[in-house]
Amino acid sequence: MNEPKEKSRWSSTAIIGGIGKVIDFGALGLGTLMRSEGGQLVPGVSRAEPIEGDLQLPAQVDVVVIGGGNIGVMTALNLAERGVRVCLCEKGVIAGEASGRSLGFIDSLFMDPAKAELIIRAKQQWPEMNARVDAETGYRQTGVAAFMQNEAVLEGAQQWLEAVKEMPGVEARILSPSEAEKLAPGRWDRLVGALYEPTDALAEPRLFAPAVARAARKLGAIVVQNCAVRGVETSAGNISAVITEKGRIGCQAVVLAGGAWSPFMARSLGLDIPQFMAFSSVARVAQTSGPATGLVSTDGNYVVRPNLEGGYDICRPIAATPLTPSVLKNLNRLRPAYEQMADQLKPVFNLSTFLAEWRIPRKWPLDQPSPFERNRVLMPETMPAMLADTLGAISRNLPDIGQAQITEQWAGVLTSTLDNMPVISAVTERPGLYLGTGFYFGLTMAPAAGEALADLAMGNSPKIDLSLYRYSRFHDGSPIRFRG
Ligand SMILES: Cc1cc2nc3c(=O)[nH]c(=O)nc-3n(C[C@H](O)[C@H](O)[C@H](O)COP(=O)(O)OP(=O)(O)OC[C@H]3O[C@@H](n4cnc5c(N)ncnc54)[C@H](O)[C@@H]3O)c2cc1C
């Protein structure tokens, strides 16, 4: 995805008119395609705390990790802790993309039971994180509560609780309206209760991945920023090296944790990861009074996180999903995901974003700049109108937060796969390659995902069952079931 130089002056409706003739947009609704707010990529700036990295590439390591987001850094930390020689290559800076832009929830409310083992394993590791990396990651076990003003939603919460309550690590319960009000005093009309998980938590995305990368370095990991991996070399069919913009690194295993970029690296290796992007916006408001817990309002359709500075980060759980060539190519396969996430995903068409993906070749020579070097920090435009609307909704329940001054706004790229399950997997067709990609809740899951990827790369048995996360599910005829 090359950085667009300027906002497109082309009318997106003209393009859509042409494409719409050959594709059935039934599930999306042609009207939605006329929207373009939130679909534009803009020159990216990291908001993560900068870290000092290594300048010299090693000649040889055991494992190369591609990507310095939450998943890549946790993989590198796990490997370094076990004495494995690991080099992490990040094309921009640590947590420059999704990982430095998330809302900061470590959250299990309404998780699909299929994801429980991974999420619970991650949540077991989170409380030790600050001590493990000897730094502030912002982790606070504040609990997370979903406030409900609607009987039907309460009924759904009760059903969910019934399905998960026997699982180890689940302590969720329904709070009465008066219990809920104590957690978040405010103006709550017709509150019917709150679904509350006291073991859920919050972290600071600006701090987490940088702190983990620093800790991994202290244990001997080599972390090279501004170093895109262009491709891999194989020997007798096995991965034997990566070629980066700064040179070659010999290795036996590669973990691809490239976030939104993973499908393009995978495609250059003859693999197909059916993953799509969703652009979401967050606002930070100045210090004010409000709940100490992470709060989701199901009726107000907003999410509120108290941050370390005494202010709040807020967003609406709605994202703009750009229609790009890979989305259009996979439209039939993606349809169930779009339908299931229809209340969260708003398809948008932006010509420059469409063309930016269109221009990414299927393959490139490894001795010349690759697409990864052309965009160091992938960043979409923010959606100020949606954020203003969200603050309006918050004002009705929590006026101090809703009326507080906005101090920062940002947007980031979420990724999902066809079934909304990440890929944590070896690749039979490419011995030595491991995939850690397609995370929609990649802050919550990072500790367990990094542990599992380290196990895979070392040839150890993972601590959790990874069968639902295997890459081959997309291609071996398995029924694909969407998981919320
Ligand atoms: C607005 C927003 C709110 C969110 N809120 C939450 C939340 O509350 N809770 C939660 O659990 N999750 C949340 N998420 C999701 C979470 O942030 C992501 O799932 C997670 O950050 C994904 O991490 P990652 O390491 O897979 O990807 P990324 O953070 O995108 O990292 C991938 C990295 O790989 C690098 N890279 C790619 N290709 C190459 C290459 N060839 N060579 C070198 N480097 C490369 C990229 O530059 C990038 O830095 C949110 C996301 C957004 C955008």
Image (cartoon, rainbow, N blue to C red):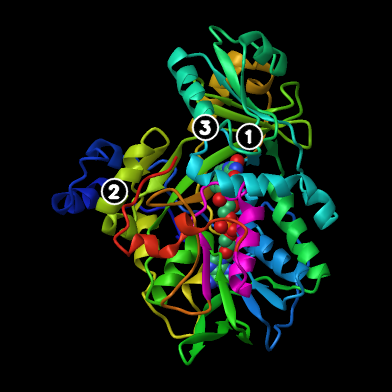
Whole-number angstrom distance, CA of label 1 to CA of label 2: 47 Å
Labels 3 and 2: the sequence-earlier one? 2
Mark 3 element type: loop
Q: Nearer the viewer, residue 149 or 475?
A: 475
Whole-number angstrom distance, CA of label 1 to CA of label 3: 26 Å
Residue type for callout 3: Arg
Residue 323 x/y as whole percent: 33, 51
Q: Quadrant of the C terminus?
A: top left
Q: Residue, x 70% and y 27% (percent of image)?
A: 293
Q: Nearer the viewer, mark 3 or mark 2?
A: 3
Residue 407 x/y as whole percent: 69, 35
**Callouts 1 and 3 close, C-beta under 8 Å:** no
Residue type for callout 2: Ser
Which mark is on residue 316?
A: 3
Q: Residue, x 54% and y 11% (percent of image)?
A: 192
Which mark is on residue 12?
A: 2
Q: Nearer the viewer, mark 1 or mark 3?
A: 1
Mark 1 element type: loop
Query: Would residue 8 appear left or right of 25 to someone viewing this image?
Result: right
Labels 1 and 2: the sequence-earlier one? 2
- The outermost residue toward the front is 166
Whole-number angstrom distance, CA of label 3 to CA of label 2: 25 Å
Magenta stretch, residue numbers: 433-461
Q: Quadrant of the N terminus?
A: bottom left
Q: Would residue 44 be visible to someone looking at this image?
A: no
